[in-house]
Amino acid sequence: MPANFPMPAPERVSEVLADLMGRGVTVARTRTVEIGGGRPAALANYQIDAGDVGVVCVADIRLANALGAALTMVSPEAVEDAVASKTIDESTIENFREVVNVMTSLFNSGDTPHVKFHEVHCLPAELPAETATLLESPRGRRDFDVTVDEYGTGTLSVLLA
């Protein structure tokens, strides 16, 4: 069964992130990465107007920190420190929320239900049942390597209902 939402092409993800960051962002498809297993990451979910989860994006710890830091031009060394300590601090999560909110444009089209950013969860964490179900059984999935100039490369997984 096809996904209800458009699967973004790497070029489109790159364009949206580069415009927001004001710096180069390279995006390429990659192999499917494991989500969970106690690995730190940031998960954003998007809801349709009726409240159901339609899209989930998961950024590994490196990418979540890189996007959060690059948005407000925090030192790239802060990303390395956060990755080494396996943390994503609250100010980085706030910045990441802004990034994933802008990414909403990747999932809306005239032919699909309207989705809007809903919330971010820092993994590992207990997730709402509907989000956990989508992680286990998406209708569509694509994984990307995302490189933010000066801030490094991490992975982004996009899962569609």
Image (cartoon, helix red, strand yellow):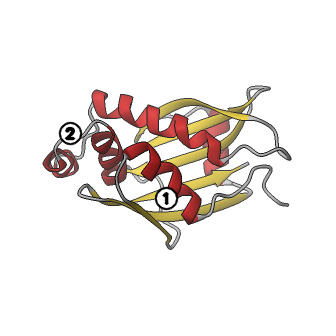
Q: Is residue 23 left or right of residue 104?
A: left
Residue 41 visible to an observer of this rendering:
no
Q: Is residue 16 left or right of residue 48?
A: left
Q: What amino acid is at disc 1?
A: Ser
Write down the residue under mark 2: 74
Which quadrant holds residue 123? Answer: top left
Instruction: Say what secondary structure mark 1 lies in.
Output: helix
Residue 63 visible to an observer of this rendering:
yes
Label 2, residues with CA under 10 Å away: few <14, some 14-19, many ≥20: some
Label 1, residues with CA under 10 Å away: few <14, some 14-19, many ≥20: many
Instruction: Say what secondary structure mark 2 lies in.
Output: loop
Which quadrant holds residue 3? Answer: bottom right
Q: Residue at x 67, y 36 (%)?
A: 130
Q: Nearer the viewer, residue 154 or 35?
A: 154
Q: Residue at x 45, y 32 (%)?
A: 98
Position of 137 relative to 95 (above/below): below
Q: Is residue 50 left or right of residue 160?
A: right
Q: Quadrant of the N terminus?
A: bottom right
Write down the residue under mark 1: 14
Q: Nearer the viewer, residue 22 or 88?
A: 22
Query: Can you give x and y, in whole percent of width and height, for residue 113 in the image?
Result: 81, 38
Q: Earlier in the sequence, mark 2 or mark 1?
A: 1
Question: Is the C-beta separation of discs 2 and 1 under 8 Å?
Answer: no
Mark 2 and mark 1: span between their CA atoms?
20 Å
Looking at the image, the residue that sits furthest to the bottom is: 31
Q: What amino acid is at disc 2?
A: Val
Q: Nearer the viewer, residue 29 or 102?
A: 102
